[in-house]
Image: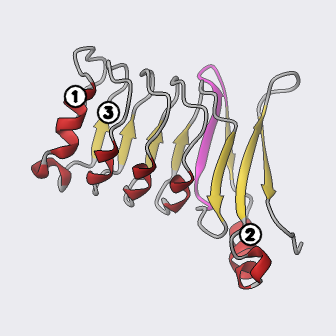
Amino acid sequence: LDLEGNKDILNSHLQDICECEQLSFRLSYLCLKGTGITKLPREIGKLKHLEILYVGNTKISDLPQEIGELKHLQTLDVGGTDIRELPPQIGELNNLRTLDVRNTRVRELPWQAGQISESLRVLLGDKSDSVQVQVPEGVNKDLVKHRSIPELANSTLSIAILDGFGPPLVGTFKVLGRNVR
């Protein structure tokens, strides 16, 4: 369902789309770029087969935690929105391959230990000068291996996005908790 650029699409219309049972089992692509929506409803989680979600260039300022229920989601574009942080539930999305946070205020990407896909591409920066970050090879395997250690069982891997006063955006990785290596 491609609604890109349709300023007549409002929050109530999106709510109706998410609650439509006929769509919830069939909809795999939803493009809301440049529409009049200001909020994703909690019912977005009902679109169980959604693989691609474009909400860039809207007035959305946060994502509901129900985004984590979209287990088939492969592409999420929130570029050009007022989003400042992503809900932790996004790290249960094992099929996520592309996350576009260009032109947002997102500065940290949280994942539970062992849940991050090594094929995930994160697009940072602005549209004209973007940076692509991928998880270093072996990070996920090491986190999974060390989850059996009680102090590390609930470790969170986050990607901190540094910009501001220096060179272009850089992705750094930090593991909270006691580090084995």
Q: Where residue 45 sits: x, y (%)?
A: 33, 52
How far apart marks 3 and 1 lie (CA) works out to: 16 Å
> What are the residue bounds of the magenta stretch?
118-130
Query: Residue 122 magenta-drawn?
Result: yes
- Quarter placement of the N terminus: top left
Q: Where residue 29 sits: x, y (%)?
A: 29, 43
> Is label 1 in a helix, a strand or a loop?
helix
Query: Residue 115 magenta-drawn?
Result: no
Q: Residue under circle 1?
A: 12
Q: Where residue 136 sits: x, y (%)?
A: 74, 59
Q: Foreground: 63 or 76?
A: 63
- Splitting the image into 4 quarters, where does residue 148 fall? bottom right
Q: Residues within 10 Å of mark 1 (few under 14, many from 20)?
A: few
Q: Nearer the viewer, mark 1 or mark 2?
A: 1
User: Most extreme residue toward the bottom, as rendered?
Assistant: 148
- Does residue 30 lie above or below 164 as drawn? below
Q: What is the three-letter code of the residue carrying label 1?
A: Ser
Q: What is the three-letter code of the residue carrying label 3?
A: Cys
How far apart marks 1 and 2 lie (CA) works out to: 44 Å
Residue 154 vs residue 23: left or right? right
- Please give the label number shown on residue 91: none
- Does residue 85 lie above or below 47 as drawn? above
> Is label 2 in a helix, a strand or a loop?
loop
Q: Residue under circle 3?
A: 31
The overriding secondary structure of the stretch rendered in magenta is strand
